[in-house]
Amino acid sequence: MLDINKIRQDFPILKRQVNGKPLVYFDNAATSQTPQQVIDVIVDYYSNYNANIHRGVHALSQEATDKYEEARLTIQHHFNAEKAHEIIFTSGTTHSINLVANGFATLLQKDDELIVSALEHHSNIVPWQMLCEKTGAILKVIPMTLEGELDMDAYSKLLSNKTKLVFVNHISNALGTINPIKSIIDQAHKVGAAVLIDGAQACPHIKPDVQALDADFYVTSAHKICGPTGIGMLYGKEAWLNKMQPYQGGGEMIDQVTFEKTTYAGLPHKFEAGTPNICGGIAFGAALDYMNAIGFDAIADYEHELLDYGTKQLEAIDGLKIYGTSKNKTSVISFNLEGIHPYDVGTLLDKMGIAVRTGHHCAQPIMAFYKIPGTVRASFAFYNTKSEIDALVEGVKKAKMMLS
Ligand SMILES: *Cc1c(COP(=O)(O)O)cnc(C)c1O
């Protein structure tokens, strides 16, 4: 059982008013809020030991380096990676995916096949399309069902010895569907393909074990897990990371530089060119510590309660349709009111202090599938409450009255 009142005390922003009303923050799938414990770590870094890492002999540089590398270990343990140097710090999920897509440019040939799913965020589509343009590889799509699930029979049929890479999200940000990634990974491995899992939407709800999953790559952003923006990670199996070309050149990622030839540093530094987001990396570790202290089992149980509660109440509103009705879902409710544009609903809810997201949620293919311009998306975190959901339901009813 979570002590929600105590947890809410950790988040200063939850005390805010918006448009004269107490803030109800239901845009957690876009970014989570930051607890005081993580804010304190950020303040401590800039107040006490801000310095560039790895190269310095002085005390501050040593302290900053130690804390940054400790954070890498925290991340390694959280995701159960075998080796610390399999964790690459990036600026976030988008950066991680671009890094892998770029790293595969020299590993693919014309007519090799890549498989994406219909449920992806644009950041797990566009970098691969760019890679296909560069290499002549072909992109195939796992179709989705009306419930918002992947068509796994179709997936099995897409796989062949031409398949080199499969990339799917662990959880859909637009619909909340939890995808059967273990089965996706196992089937891909049977044909010798590598798999990248976009975990941006999963990590706030689930603690993934990359070794148990046998994922080749797993990527996420800190800002959806109570950490700051501009920092994230790429987990990659050592063997793949060694095969891949570095994504960016510069300081930190080299071994020897001459004008004739440059040799690269070993892992993880080969993929970490330039001064990184040092404070962000340390705060990422602190965010995982915070979430783990609460416990992911307790978080998942409570969020399910919120999801069931919210789904029942919203479903009961006449003319409201929920998109994404899989039994395997996290606490995301995407919906529309019949005949009303999602943007108008979102704008009215904002007037009531309720923050939801409206639009295509960076997943235009899903919206095209349902033939809608977008949805209203309410996404719940472990610091939300049933009474906040009551406020949302009242707000949606009011919006419906005003707009129809
Ligand atoms: C948020 C999100 C992304 C993009 O993350 P960034 O932090 O913007 O790079 C990618 N995929 C999914 C499923 C997401 O939810």
Image (cartoon, rainbow, N blue to C red):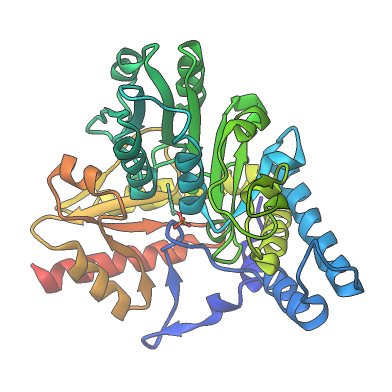
Number of residue marks: 0
Q: Residue at x 77, y 60 (%)?
A: 68
Q: Hey, which quadrant is residue 317 in on the image?
A: bottom left
User: Taking the image as drawn, is residue 317 in sight?
Assistant: no
Q: Residue furthest bottom?
A: 20
Quarter occupied by the C terminus:
bottom left
Write the residue at 64% across / 42% down.
Answer: 297
Say which of 40 and 282 sits in front: 282
In the rendered view, tell whether residue 244 sits above or below residue 192.
below
Q: Quadrant of residue 180?
A: top left
Residue 333, image x and y in percent? 34, 51
Q: Could you say where residue 268 lies in the image, as x and y percent from the top left?
A: 70, 45
Position of 90 with respect to 22 (left or right) is right
Q: In the shown orientation, is residue 359 left or right of residue 400?
A: right
Q: Name the residue located 87 percent from the left edge and 67 percent from the top edge.
A: 63
131 up-or-down from 376: above or below: above
Q: Is residue 2 left or right of residue 386?
A: right
Residue drawn at x 58%, y 42% as measured from the top left: 206
Q: Quadrant of residue 279?
A: bottom right
On the question of residue 285 being in view, the answer is yes
